[in-house]
Amino acid sequence: MTNLISRATNHYFPLRHHFPLISSSSFRPKKSPKRFITRTMSSSTKSSNQQQQCIFQLKIDPLTGNSEWIVVSEEEVKDEVFLSSTSYLDMLNDSPRNQAYRAAIDKTVTKPCHVLDIGAGTGLLSMMAARAMNSSCAASVDDTVGMVSACESYLPMIKLLRKVLHLNGMDNKICIVPKRSDEVKVGDCIARRADVLVSEILDSELLGEGLIPTLQHAHDELLVQNPRTVPHRAITYGQLVECEFLWKMHDLHNCEVKVSDGTHLAPVGLETIVGVKQRQYAMHCNSISNDIRLLSEPFKIFEFDFGKRPDSHGVTELCVNATSDGRVHALISWWVLQLDREGTIFYSTAPKWINSPFKDKELQIFRPSWCDHWKQCVWFFPGTGVSLIKDEQVHIEAAHDETSVSYSFKHHDYKANPGNCDADSKDCQLTFSPERIAIYGDRNWRSSILTTVKDALQGKDCSLCVVADDSIFLTILIASVSTNSQVISMFPGIQEKGFRYLQAVAGANCFSMDRVKVIGKKRCLTMDDTNQKKVDILVGEPFYYGNEGMLPWQNLRFWKERTMLDPVLSKDVLIMPCKGILKACAMSLPDLWRSRCTLKNIEGFEHSVVNTSLGACGDMSASKEGPCLPYFIWQCGEIKELSEVFTVLEFDFLKPISSCFGRKRVEFSKTGICHGFVLWIDWVLDRENSVVLSTGPDHRYWKQGVKLLSKPIAVGNLESCSDTNAHGDRRGWVEFEASFDASSGELSMSHSFQ
């Protein structure tokens, strides 16, 4: 029996000494956990010139949302607590990336020199540089002529870096600089300016990890004039597309116009009061290739030369020819790295429909088949988009600051801010994730909620209704459908801003704010809040602002809050949803598994020592299996269901929260290689079980939980299977168990194959 435990109680936030907006250093906002603090603090038990690094750990209760800070010393830091949810593992499993960097470093570091690696991570690039330098040196050359300085500020990664260097015999060849690069000084942290810079401080947008300020400081303080760099330059590209799926992820107002169900989250005159932030969103665009119509050829946007000090801001005017009639809903962008100065080694994050622009057979073009650490980016154009005619010239202004890129059409059909709100709009505007906007505009989802709420309110003229979560939809729906009901919205995430939002849209939805009350604070509702009246209806989607990227069972917070509200609930209270059902399916996930599998030899350097800390799967003992992580399964490359969807656990919200256990024996319905289990929650809205909202893989607006196996298993009942020999005997059944701990919110799972 294999024990699989998903712990969702501890999270960590990054904090710098002076709280900068971004870090121009080896600290990785996109790759590192978002809920920890690393600080250097003086220790009274050490000498005055000694310091120790501490972690401020933010401990969050997934069932209540309550949090507290705990100080953890360097000696107490457990690497696996911090690193398993980062993208380090996925990045190190990107073989094309590793090969491209090795080829470029071997070509660039051809003599003894000082190499600076910013954002060293496990030290892979530093070790490549040290090896290249050593292989280029004659035996008589003094080893002190060349050096590699590995700059890394993330404490748990520094501990791993030391282990990896020791494992590969590189302790004396690489100097670890345990600081942010903008804290490094020549003559203090490093002996002299560096001749060569190697780095990988790039995110899907290119700039989001602080590439520009990092390069600025490096050129000002740490590098020689005209240094050699790996990468040498980066070029961003874009393409205009028509895509209804992408349109639905940002234009709530016009989606509501099509639905016409009487509920207006973004009414006329307040079209932008609910929306997404104007920024680029990372997405696996290969997964929506069938939903896309290309309206232009790819075009170059920006070029960044790593060997020169970059500007903080830049603007470029683009003239793009429309290749087809259509309506531009979005701009999809990607980037290409030129890793060597000569221009022979390239790495591209382009979507699969883009052919390489390079035809020379002498060039080395590296493209990953699937990876999660670098995706494409999507920029949504407001409203219904821009209507184009084939061969029409489109003028686009692209601008970048230190951390992001933005776009604007210069077109007669384009309105940058359609339906502006009034002067106080900033106080009441709400921004959600694109997926949440799409959910609120989805006809089927709204119809299910609307039907259930109307049935619940039927015959109850003067009900007291409580919305337990951050659902603006339920609040508006109940207030407008039941003209005599009182509504109390908890709004634990959007809080007072939710109240101002309701004030702004009340008139358009025909309800009065004197019947609506917003608590907006993390406290339990009392009879004083209800004017001594018991609650008749308790509802939730469930949706908690800020929880979108977490595991599905984090929304069981609704069950905990229902329990805390028990003293104010009437005996015949109606609760919606009345039940949550934990569903699961055994799946083949080869691309995801390859990105999370154990590391061994990477371009000649042993990395097995990091597997446990990074939460790797494959060739690991049961006690060292990786965590359950949230993913959009439909964006995970190649996927295949190997079993029927089965129920693991049922959570009865009609009763106070309690621990529960479930077991299911499931036969594999298809032959293949099982890489793990995908889990999600279906919400049963009514007691008759007639209205169910699923958050499974077939519904693209929700993330699912994924538990990868320690080793892939060949499964199925057919007599022949080409994969059997590679993975052992085929298994026809799996017995799956799960238990939920009501006191901690932890979900434990185990399985055994038969």
Image (cartoon, rainbow, N blue to C red):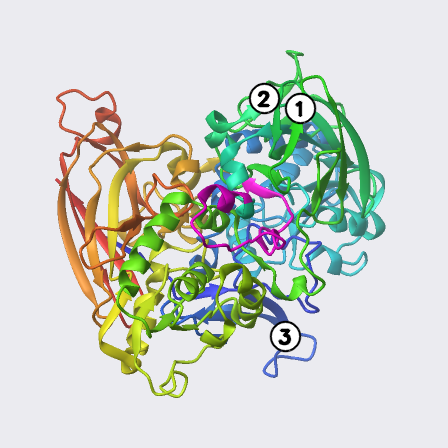
Residue at figure coordinates x 41%, y 45% from the top left: 631
Q: Earlier in the sequence, mark 2 or mark 1?
A: 1
Residue at figure coordinates x 66%, y 21% from the top left: 297
Q: In this view, does 226 lie to the left or right of 678?
A: right
Q: Is residue 542 left or right of residue 392?
A: left
Instruction: Find numbered disc 1 in the image and state the secondary structure of the residue it sits on.
Output: loop
Q: In this view, does 246 lie above or below 431?
A: above
How busy is the neighbourhood of tag 3: few (under 14 within 10 Å), some, or many (20 plus)?
some
Q: Distance between the residues labelled 3 and 2?
A: 50 Å
How busy is the neighbourhood of tag 2: few (under 14 within 10 Å), some, or many (20 plus)?
few
Contact? badges 2 and 1 (CB < 8 Å): yes
**Location of residue 300 by image quarter:** top right
- Which mark is on residue 354? 2
Q: What range of the chain is rendered magenta?
A: 254-282
Viewer can see residue 113: no
Q: Is the magenta stretch mostly helix, strand or loop?
A: loop
**To which residue does mark 1 refer?**
298
Can you give x and y, in whole percent of width and height, for residue 542 in the image?
37, 60
- Which mark is on residue 342? none
Q: Is residue 146 above or below residue 47?
A: above
- What amino acid does circle 2 point to? Ile
Can you give x and y, in whole percent of width and height, for residue 516 in the image?
46, 73
**To which residue does mark 3 refer?**
41
Question: Which numbered disc, 1 or 3, marks the residue closer to the eye?
Answer: 1
Please say whether residue 299 is one of the residues in the magenta stretch.
no
Viewer-proximal residue, 296 or 156? 296
Q: Earlier in the sequence, mark 3 or mark 2?
A: 3
- What amino acid does circle 3 point to? Met
Q: Is residue 216 above or below residue 393?
A: below
